[in-house]
Image (cartoon, rainbow, N blue to C red):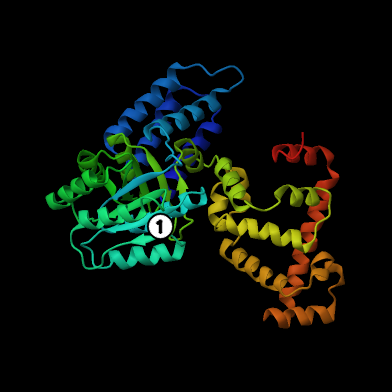
Amino acid sequence: MVLDDLGKSLKGTLQKIASAVTIDSKLIKEIVRDIQRALLQSDVNVKLVLALSKKIEKRALEEKPPAGMSGREHVIRIVHDELVNILGDSRELPIKKQIIMMTGLYGNGKTTSCGKIATYFKKKGLRPAVIAGDVHRPAAYEQLNQIAKQVDIPFYGEKDEKNAVKVVKHGLEKFKRSSDVIIVDTSGRHKLEDDLIDEMKDIFKATKPDEKLLVMDAAVGQQAGSQAKAFNDAVNITGIVLTKMDGTAKGGGALSAAAEVGAPIVFIGTGEHARDLEKFDPSRFISRLLGMGDIKTLLEKAEESMKGKDAEKTARRMMTGKFTLHDMKEQMSMLSGMGPLNKIAEMLPGGMSGKIKGIDMDNTQVKLAKFKIIMDSMTDKEMDDPSIVKSSRVKRIARGSGLENKDVKELLKYYNMTKRMMKGFSSNRKMRKGLMKQLQFGK
C-alpha cells in the first residue's frame, strides 16, 4: 500500500517510545527528528512537517499525562493526534439527491472514480447515474460507458459532440427525474491549462453542482499543492478523492495538498474494482498507518457484506457449536464480500496482523474459492452432515467440481479444524457472552 515506508518508519518510532525506560527531552527530540525524516521522505510538504514536529515536541515536553495513562502512552497518543490534525476534519458526502462534478488531471483515475462513487451511492439505496462530460480524451466516452455497464448504472454521453457544456446539460435533463445522484465526469489535461480551467468554470455554472470533487493520484508528489490550489480557485473544491493508494508511491504530497487547500479527503481508492473505495477518516487512516489497526472499518465492511443475510442466526448456531458446511460457506461468502484478504489484514491491530503476516494471502484466497466450488457440488445432506462424506462420495464430489480427491479432503480437514475451534469457543461461556454482546445479539 502507498505510504508503506512511512508506516514502517512511524511504527519504528512508536516502538522506540514504547520500549523507552524514561521519557525525557533527549528521547522526544530524537523521535521528532525521526518523524520529520520519515514525513519528508514521503513527500509531505516541508512547512507542514516543521509545524507538526514543533507541536509534537511542545506537547510532549509540556503536557502531563492524563490520570491512568503512562508517559509512553501519552506521547504515542500525541503523535497519533497531531498526524490526524494535519489531515484536517473528516467529512462524509451526504446520502441525498445531488449533483457531483468530478475534476482532475489525465491519468489520475477520475473516470474510474465516477464508477466507484456511483457504486457507493447505489449501496446506500440511491439511484446514481453518470454523464460523460470529458469530450476531449478519445477513450473517455467508451471508458465511462463500459464502467457504467459493469456496475449497472445509467449512462449519458454524446460520442461526437465536442461541446462539454451542451452534453452535460442534455444529461442533466435526461436524469433529473429518474436519478438521485448525478455524477458528471469532466475533461482533464496532462497539465493545468487556461482552456481546461475555463471549461471547468463553464460546466460549473451550467450544472450548479452540490459537490466538486478533485481526483488526485497518490503518486503526484510535491506538485500536488499547486494542482489542488488551481482547481480549488476555479470551482471551490468540496472534497478530494485520492486514487491508487494500493500502489508503492510515497503519497505524502497528495495528503499534504489536501491540508494546504483546506478541502477534506472524502474517499481513497485502494484498487481497480468498483468496491475498492473507502470513506476517508483521518483517525482511522493514521491508526492503520501506525499499526494500531482499523477495527471500525473492518466491522463496517463485515456489516455491509452481511446485508440481507441472517447474521444473528448464523452467529447463534456457531456459538452453540452447531456448525455445518452451510455455515462455513456463509462465513466464506461474507469474507470474500469484504474484499481481498491482504486488505482485511491491514485493518487488524499490529499484534494480530503480525501473526498472520507470514500467511500467503493470495494462496489462501485461491483455496477459499476452490472450497466454494467443492461445496457447490455437494448435496444438502452432505453439507448438513459432512461426516457421511467417505471415499465414494469424495470421488463423486471431486468429479462434479472438476477438482481432485485431495482438494475435497482438504476442505473436510479445514471444516473439522474450524468446527473444533468453534466448539472450544462455545464451551467458554464468558468469552461467548462477551462476543454476543459485542455483536449486539445479547442483552
Q: Write down the residue under mark 1.
A: 115
Q: Is residue 316 left or right of residue 403?
A: right
Tally the numbered discs. 1
Does the rendering let one see residue 18?
A: yes
Task: Report the residue at 79% width, 78% height from top.
Answer: 394
Q: Examine the image and state in which quarter residue 409 appears.
A: bottom right
- For the point 44% across and 58% down, the residue is 271
Q: In the figure, is residue 96 to the left or right of 304? A: left
Image coordinates of residue 252 in percent, x first then y, are 34, 44
Give neighbour class at mark 1: few <14, some 14-19, many 20+ (Cα, 10 Å). Answer: many
Which of the 4 quarters of the picture holds residue 20?
top right
Is residue 348 at least partly visible in the picture?
no
Q: Is residue 159 left or right of residue 389?
A: left
| Residue 248 locus on image (x, y percent) | 39, 55
Residue at image x 36%, y 61%? 155
Q: Residue furthest left?
A: 194
**Quadrant location of the C terminus?**
top right
Residue 276 x %, y %: 47, 55
Image location of residue 371, percent across then percent down: 68, 69
Point 57% across, 45% down: residue: 300
Residue type, label 1: Gly
